[in-house]
């Protein structure tokens, strides 16, 4: 394994609007075509009042090296980072959720749309408006998901309805026409979705995102922290359809939960193998420090990196890739993504902290069998990061392309690693 490139692309001042430059971690912000890499990086508007006080910046890296600003809009009308996917024939797409009300307005209407750029010119993007129902309410808190099928040249777009917490979705076919508008309903509000599309089979992974449901715990945390904000992420859901064009999504199934012990789950990634098995990656904490000290004193504070395979809504295989925390000597997993070199071999690239608090980035084989992790010799290891994933239209490759943050800085960094 060899690090080919490691560099800073741009920085981002905190928007102070509840999001950040990597806030849409379920949807991709980096994508690769045959010979170029594209990234979407948020910029905060100076003296623009939140919530919608940012704009996307589309950067590209050519084979000769170096980053160029390809496009940016004139106004700061987005709250969140804008996901990015690519399709064949040099087509690049940016997902926007643009405010339609004056600057400084909060929790009001936004317009979901896709901008399509030609890789040959970025001067006049084509706007695609998904056929979501007029009654749907989309606000600055969009919790969107997007996936591209690089073989068929199709895109599946999801946006959450602020009133119902349902996801409206639509399929954009290779000719730019939309079809199959529909709705996905989870048992509770579920956010930050990972979406995967292949041959019109579609898969969605999302995490429950609700106010603390246990009144005693909510009251205790408010007394200790003096914070009213108290959303919890404890139930992991999965849904799928065998044909996004003709078949509704199946009723969601619950993959894991840490509800009983007040824990935390972070949904990380989705990948589809050649036999149709959906592979799920997530972090699991059985409990959290504040609740453990009061209610679960015998539970150690530990974090595990979990990998499972789902077929027809059933978990058919599951393994803990990594476990760290109290009472253990090993590293503690902090973040992770899938990476496939050829569509068959599967790796997990992850960040972790050592017992001494040192950050590291490493790679571990998962398929055809689990292997030993190997540290990636980065000068500045990533903490939170994105990969040029197949879910975003990028083809499998022996070269990993990563976008994320390192150290405790505002810089968005890029690395290219030969596996």
Image: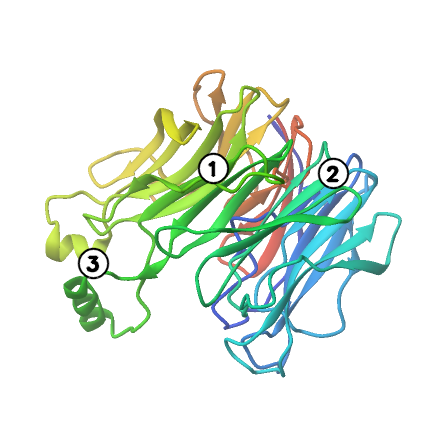
Q: Which residue is mark 2?
A: 153
- Mark whose residue sits in front, 3 or 2: 2
Residue 343 location, quadrant: top right
At 50% across and 72% down in the image, what residue appears? 17
Residue 124 location, quadrant: bottom right
As drawn, the label of residue 290 is: 3
Name the one closer to the observer, 351 or 321.
321
Q: Which residue is mark 1?
A: 350
Q: Residue 73 location, x and y as percent?
A: 75, 68
Q: Residue furthest toward the top? A: 368
Q: Is residue 408 left or right of residue 219?
A: right
- State the CA–CA distance, disc 3 to disc 1: 26 Å
Q: Residue 96 location, x and y as percent?
A: 66, 61
Q: Using a 10 Å C-alpha cutoff, classify the residue at mark 1 as few (fewer than 14 neighbours), some (14 to 19) or many (20 or more).
A: many
Q: Is residue 340 visible?
A: yes
Q: Dot 1: what SS?
A: strand
- State the CA–CA distance, disc 3 to disc 2: 47 Å
Q: Dot 2: what SS?
A: loop
Q: Is residue 380 visible?
A: no
At 14% across and 55% down in the image, what residue appears? 293
Q: Is residue 220 left or right of residue 5?
A: left
Q: Using a 10 Å C-alpha cutoff, classify the residue at mark 2 as few (fewer than 14 neighbours), some (14 to 19) or many (20 or more).
A: many
Q: Residue 171 location, x and y as percent?
A: 65, 46
First-in-chain label (1 vs 2): 2
Q: Dot 3: what SS?
A: helix
- Mark whose residue sits in front, 1 or 2: 2
At 22% across and 41% down in the image, what residue appears? 326
First-in-chain label (3 vs 1): 3
Count up the numbered dots. Answer: 3
């Amino acid at each position: 394994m060899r690090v080919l490139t490691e560099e800073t692309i741009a920085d981002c001042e905190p928007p102070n609007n509840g999001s950040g430059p990597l806030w849409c971690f379920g949807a991709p912000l980096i994508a690769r075509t045959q010979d170029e890499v594209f990234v979407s990086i948020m910029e905060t508007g100076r003296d623009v009042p939140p919530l919608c006080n940012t704009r996307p910046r589309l950067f590209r890296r050519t084979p000769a090296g170096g980053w160029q600003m390809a496009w940016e809009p004139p106004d700061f009308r987005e709250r969140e980072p804008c996901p990015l996917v690519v399709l064949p024939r040099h087509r690049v797409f940016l997902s926007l959720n643009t405010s339609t009300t004056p600057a400084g307005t909060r929790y009001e209407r936004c317009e979901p749309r896709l901008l399509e750029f030609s890789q040959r010119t970025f001067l006049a993007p084509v706007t695609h408006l998904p056929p979501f129902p007029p009654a749907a309410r989309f606000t600055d808190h969009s919790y969107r998901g997007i996936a591209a099928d690089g073989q068929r040249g199709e895109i599946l777009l999801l946006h959450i309805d602020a009133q119902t917490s349902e996801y409206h979705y639509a399929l954009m076919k290779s000719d730019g026409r939309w079809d199959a508008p529909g709705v996905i309903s989870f048992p509770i509000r579920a956010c930050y979705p990972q979406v995967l599309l292949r041959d019109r089979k579609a898969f969605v992974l999302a995490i429950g995102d609700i106010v603390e449901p246990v009144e005693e715990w909510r009251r205790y945390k408010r007394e200790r922290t003096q914070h009213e904000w108290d959303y919890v992420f404890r139930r992991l859901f999965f849904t799928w359809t065998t044909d996004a064009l003709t078949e509704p999504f199946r009723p969601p199934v619950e993959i894991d939960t840490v509800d009983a012990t007040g824990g935390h789950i972070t949904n990380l990634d989705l990948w589809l193998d050649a036999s149709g098995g959906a592979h799920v990656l997530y972090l699991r904490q059985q409990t959290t420090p504040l609740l453990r000290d009061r209610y679960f004193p015998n539970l150690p504070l530990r974090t595990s990196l979990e990998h499972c395979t789902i077929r027809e809504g059933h978990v058919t295989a599951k393994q803990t890739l990594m476990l760290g925390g109290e009472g253990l000597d090993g590293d503690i997993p902090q973040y992770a993504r899938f990476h496939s070199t050829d569509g068959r071999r599967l790796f997990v690239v992850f960040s972790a902290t050592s017992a001494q608090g040192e950050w590291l980035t490493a790679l571990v084989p998962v398929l055809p069998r689990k292997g030993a992790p190997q540290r990636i010799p980065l000068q500045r290891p990533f903490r939170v990061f994105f990969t040029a994933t197949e879910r975003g239209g990028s083809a499998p490759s022996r070269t990993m392309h990563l976008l994320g943050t390192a150290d405790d800085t505002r810089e968005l960094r890029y690395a290219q690693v030969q596996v």
